[in-house]
Amino acid sequence: MLKRIFAPKMALVFLALAVLGVIFYGPAAQYPFVHDDVVFIQANPDIGRWDNIADVFFHPGVNWGAGAIATPYYRPVLEVFYRLEYKIFGMAPSGFHAFNIGLHVVNSWLVWAVLTIGFACSAGVGLFLACIFLLHPVQTQAVACVSGISNLAVTFFCLLSFLCYLMIRRSGMDLVWLYLSGAAFLVALFTKEAAVVLPLIVAGHEWSFGAGVRRKAPVLTLAVLAVLYLAWRQVLFPGFSAQVFDSQGEFRLRLLAIPAALLNYVTLIVWPVNLHYYRSLDILAPKLSPALFLFGFGLLTAAGLMKVKEDVRRQVLFGLGWFLICLLPVLNIAPLINEYSFVQAAEHFVYLPLVGILVAVAALSPGLALGLSRQVRMGAAIGLVLACGMLTAQQLPFWRCEVVLFERAAAFEPRAGRVRLLLARSYADARRYDDALREYSASLQIMTEYVKKAGHSGAGAVYAQFVKTIYFDRGQVLLFKGDLDGSTREYLCSLAVKSKDYGGFNSRQQDSRTFNNLALNMIRSGDVVQAGKYFKQAVVFDGNNAEALSNLGVYSFQKKDTEMARFWFERALKVRPGFGSAWEYLKELDRSPAAPRSFQKG
């Protein structure tokens, strides 16, 4: 069996997939970090640390600050991946992109192995379907976005675990394969929570193909590991399970939206056009049409399967089961809310489910090709692969920068306030200030409506915080445009929004930054007295705001109070030991009677 796995044919298949992967995904290696990549890599303070690596397994991950509507984030193996990549590539995006492309190629090769070893698929048909997995345009999001490695990595470990399970069925109850399957599954769980469905897939395979000899050990092993993992998550996030059912009305709406979500994912695979980031579904939209369509499609599928052979029917049903089971974590049974009534329906959600569709197609392929000559079959297969490749090549450039990425997202999701906010920020970074202000205004209008609709609730506090942030960002942009009065006005509007009035917590750190920037505006306008008051307010709201502490030092020195200046500079360094400006100010105090004059913006 091992000889079969490592046969030259496997190497040739891998080489073919690698060549196609480089041809069609290679341009992504030149793209920068975008959106989530910045959070997980560029802005990750621990990205270069290994002394605290064990902590990532015992504590929740990134704090999104979204209160009760956020899904708990716990993916420690992913953090290990990021640190390893940083160790190898530094902050060069090209290395991270190349790693994604390589892992996607490996996953495509594993798909080929699963199809040929587990489902008696011919090498040629397996290669064709592996190429579809590799080049299907819906995969672009998972591959071109560096943080999409979460989907690539969890799929790698799940396919590896499933392949080891298949070896158990072929080689008898070999404990080595059982241990390897369990180990790969355990790593998958700590890579991304979506892996928790793998025991159901293995159980489905046993039920579909285990006639005569059904092996309980693999299913029970994976099931026990899944239960232990879920118990551990409950320890880390003790209140989240209850949040799923907190609002019975919202939970009912999410369940009613499942047919629309399923139809969305089927459409993405069958007709992959208008692909874009931040794809959402409105759970308040009418639900009847998608449900009726899926019901009719189900009846037609059932009628068609009645006419095929038993073994074909079993494999098709298993493939469709794989597809549906893998989608369970993203059908919004547990809330995956983008904003207000819009739930996530992301394209990368179908990365692993697509394997199930390919399993079903593998079973039907002999019947579909019946009566066709070898040349026609080859031509059709090559044509489909090239069509997928061309669609992927067209989709890939939308990831070349944040402006292009969010312009496309906003074109398809114009009512999404977060998309408009992200587009505004990308415009601001590109110094397209008028465009940024236009998008900030659109986002502000949407978020203000959400605040009114959500009222005094946790969600209301979240949207109030967005409103506060938008005012602050607009103040920054107006300052860059030279509108000092407009900037000051926006900062004051930001301070006037109190998220605690809507059931949340006051954002003292945000307000501290705003007071610091207000003080700088007062310096620019010549009102030094008011500037001092604002600097002090900034420190009152957040005593760890190093910029505000340092600015108070500069302010005190300019008031000829060298003792207080030294106090504030030293306090800033205590908060942030590597704060270079504060060190320079202290040195200047020691060697020169002239006061430091450089203030720090928050």
Image (tube, rainbow, N blue to C red):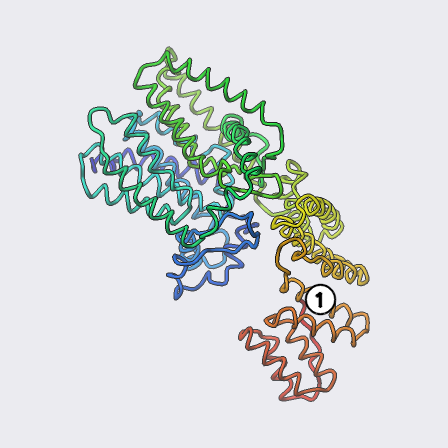
* Quarter of the image where the N terminus is located: top left
How many numbered discs sit on the rendered protein?
Answer: 1
Front residue of this view, candidates 313 and 378: 313
Mark 1 Cα-neighbour bin, 10 Å: few <14, some 14–19, many ≥20? many
The kind of residue tagged 1 is Asn
Q: Position of residue 322 (x, y in %)?
A: 38, 31
* Residue 236, image quadrant: bottom left
**Which residue in the structure is indicated by mark 1?**
517
Q: Kindly identify the residue that appears in the image at 68 percent across and 77 percent down.
A: 552
Q: Position of residue 314 (x, y in %)?
A: 33, 21
Left or right of 130, for residue 349: right
Left or right of 295, for residue 425: right
Q: Secondary structure at mark 1?
A: helix
* Quarter of the image where the C terminus is located: bottom right
Front residue of this view, candidates 132 and 218: 218
Left or right of 396, for residue 125: left
Left or right of 305, for residue 266: right
Q: Is residue 261 above or below residue 79?
A: above
Q: Position of residue 48 (x, y in %)?
A: 45, 63
* Residue 579, image quadrant: bottom right
Q: Kindly identify the residue that appears in the image at 59 percent across and 71 percent down.
A: 544
Q: Kindly identify the residue that appears in the image at 53 percent across and 44 percent down.
A: 246
Q: Position of residue 250 (x, y in %)?
A: 57, 38
